[in-house]
Amino acid sequence: MKIIVIDNGSQWTHRIYRTLRDLDCDSIIMPNTSGLNEVRDADALVLSGGSMRVGKDSLEGGNNDLFLKEFTGPILGVCAGMQLIGKHYGSKVKPSIKPEFGKIDLLVDNFDDLFQGVPEKSIAWASHNDEVSELPKDFILLAHSKDVKIHAFKHSKKPVYGTLFHPEVQHTEFGEKIYANFIQTIKR
């Protein structure tokens, strides 16, 4: 199984790659300026986080919007990757009222797909200034925190998922499980 990690400049992009590799996936990292033809043969994409300020209309998104429009396989967006998904599907991405940096209590609202086998409350690692402020049309809330009402979501009809927290960071208690669950969505 081939999963391409789209590098949006996150300090943890390589950790996403390593987590996927440790889960026996053929994974490679490609810049967000890669062309659609370069990612078409992937089984799935992971859109990494990055320092871009999606809530301030950053222009650093590369071809993420094109991937979201044209790539038909499963997509997981992490942090800024999730924000790019939200923006692509018509939601507002705004500066967070209370940005989160460090460990948070993640509260699961829906145990479908990504959160199967994850407890209702666990520790996750967050590092963001912006957030998706409302669910995009056709999206389902999966998780939240005390300060952020949308920490994870999924599209109701397409295999598109997003997490504002970072499952790849070791401080996220069930991060590897979340990536393993994402891999299971690819196998369906």
Image (cartoon, rainbow, N blue to C red):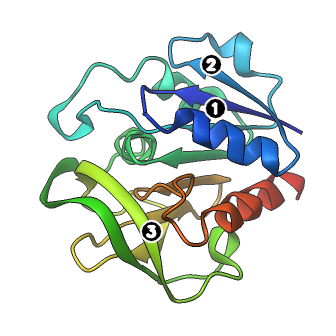
Residue located at (51% from left, 19% from top): 32
Location of mark 2 (residue): 30
Q: Position of residue 82 (x, y in %)?
A: 44, 48
Nearest the eye: 108 or 18 = 18
Dot 1, how many residues are within 10 Å of its Cα: few (below 14), some (14-19), or many (20+)?
A: many
Q: What residue is rendered at 62% in x and 19% in y? A: 30
Q: Residue 45: where, in percent of width, then height? A: 67, 36
Residue 181 in which image quadrant: bottom right
Mark 1 and 2 residues: CB-CB less than 8 Å, in contact?
yes
User: Residue at 31% across / 52% down in the picture?
Assistant: 127
Q: Marks 1 and 2, how far apart in space? A: 6 Å
Work out whether mark 3 precedes mark 2 in sequence or the reverse, and give the earlier one: 2
The secondary element bearing badge 2 is classed as strand
Q: Residue 32, relative to residue 137: is it above or below?
A: above
Residue flagged by tag 2: what amino acid is it? Met
Any mark on residue 124, and which? Answer: 3
Q: Amino acid at mark 1?
A: Val
Measured as percent of width and height from the top left, residue 146 is found at: 25, 80
Mark linked to residue 177:
none
Q: Residue furthest left?
A: 97
Residue 119 lies in what quarter of the image?
bottom right
**Cα separation between marks 3 and 2:** 26 Å
* Residue 12 drawn above or below residue 108: above
Judged from the image, the secondary structure of the residue bearing numbered disc 3 is strand
Query: Where does the image place residue 118, in percent across and percent down from the top left?
Result: 63, 81
Which residue carries the number 1 mark? 5
Q: How many marks?
A: 3
- Which one is nearer the viewer's eye here, 11 or 91? 11
